[in-house]
Image: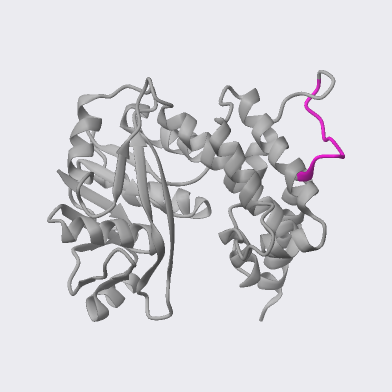
Amino acid sequence: MRILIVGAGAIGGYFGARLLEAGRDVTFLVRPSRAAALAQHGLIVRSPRGDVNLSHPPCVVTGQLKTTFDAILLSCKAYDLPDAIEAIAPAVSAQTMIVPLLNGMQHLDALAARFDKANLLGGLCFISVDRDEQGAVIHYNNTDTLMFGELDGSASERAQQLAAVLMDAGFDARLSASPNPNILHEMWEKWVFIAAAAGMTCLMRSAVGDYVAAGGAELAQRLIDECYAIAAHNGHPAREPAVTRAQKMLAAEGSPFMASMLRDVERGAPTEAEHLLGDLWRRRPPQNGATMIDERSVLYLAYTHLKAYEARRLRIKHAAP
C-alpha cells in the first residue's frame, strides 16, 4: 500500500518516520523549504520509544505530484487545510483513502466538498510532539496513538487493509469500528476535551496549575460542562472515563499542562480557534427555542478572546513595513 503523508512536521514526521523504519511504502508531500531541509539534515525523531534517523526520506514537492496513492494521512493545521486540499488533489483516485488527523469536525465537510465522501475515513491521534530549531521531531512521552475508521462505523475491507499496514509499525495504531464507539464518537470526545483545554488555558493565558492557584477551577468546570453538553446535544455524549479525565486534568493543582494553542498565542502565531472553539459553539443547543448568545457561556468568552487576539495579530502584521 502506497501512503502519502502531507507534511513532514511534528505529527506527520513522527508517524511517517515510524512507518518508513518499519519498511512501509511512504512518501512525504512537502513544501520546497522543508524538502531542502530534509535533503540536508534528513528526518530525525527523538523519542522515549526510540530515535529514528532517516538520511533521505522519500519526498515530493507540492505541485509536483504525478501519481495517485492508496492512502493519504493529512495532519496539517486547520488554517492550512484549503491549500492542503488542493495540494493532494492529484494524488486522489476513486480508491484513495483520505485519513485526516485534524481536531474538530469542520474539516470533514471541506474534504467532502472537494472529493467524494467515499474517499474519507475518520482519524485522530494522541501524541505530544514538536519540532526543534533544527527541524528534528521531538516526542515528549510514550503516547503515540493513531486511531482511524470508516465514518459509518463499519469494519470495511479497505479499513482492515489499512490497519494491517499501520499496525506493528512502531506506534499504537487502532482501527475504530462498531459496536465499540466508532471513529466519529472518538473524534467528538477528543474535540470537546481539546476545546475545553484550549479555551481555558488561552482565556487565562496560563498553565492549568496557575489558573487553579488563582481560583479558576470552578470556571474550568463550567467550560467542561458546556463543551460536553454540546457534544451530547449533537448525539455524541461522552463516556464517563473521558469526562472524569478532563475534570482531573483541567483542575490539577500545580499542573504545567497547557494546550498547544496557548503556545501558538504566546509566539504570535495563527490559531485554530475558529475550527475548534467557534465551530463547537455554533453547534450549541438552542436557548429558549432560539440559538442565541448566552452571556454565561465560558466557551463564547474564550472564543471571543481568541478572535480578538487574531484580529490584533493581523492588524499588527498588516501594519508592519
Residue drawn at x 42%, y 76% is 132
Q: Which residues are magenta?
A: 290-298
Up-down relation of residue 296 to residue 24 (above or below):
above
Q: Position of residue 5 (x, y in %)?
A: 29, 53
Residue drawn at x 64%, y 66% is 265
Q: Position of residue 219 (x, y in %)?
A: 79, 48
Rendering quarter of residue 191: top right
Q: Is residue 275 visible?
A: no
**The residue positioned farthest toward the front in the image shown:** 253
Is residue 294 in the magenta section?
A: yes
Q: How is the image coloured?
A: one colour
**The residue positioned farthest toward the right in the image shown:** 295
Q: Is residue 253 visible?
A: yes
Rendering quarter of residue 314: bottom right
Q: Position of residue 186 (x, y in %)?
A: 46, 34
For the image, the number of numbered tags is: 0
Q: Position of residue 111 (x, y in %)?
A: 42, 38
Is residue 247 in the magenta section?
A: no
Up-down relation of residue 49 to residue 217 (above or below):
below
Question: On the rendered structure, is 255 left or right of 135?
Answer: right
In this view of the protein, which residue sits in the foreground, 250 or 133? Answer: 250
Magenta residues, dominant SS class: loop
Question: On the rendered structure, is 293 left or right of 21?
Answer: right
Q: Quadrant of the N terminus?
A: top left
Rendering quarter of residue 285: top right
Q: Quadrant of the C terminus?
A: bottom right
Residue drawn at x 32%, y 47% is 73
Residue drawn at x 65%, y 44% is 247
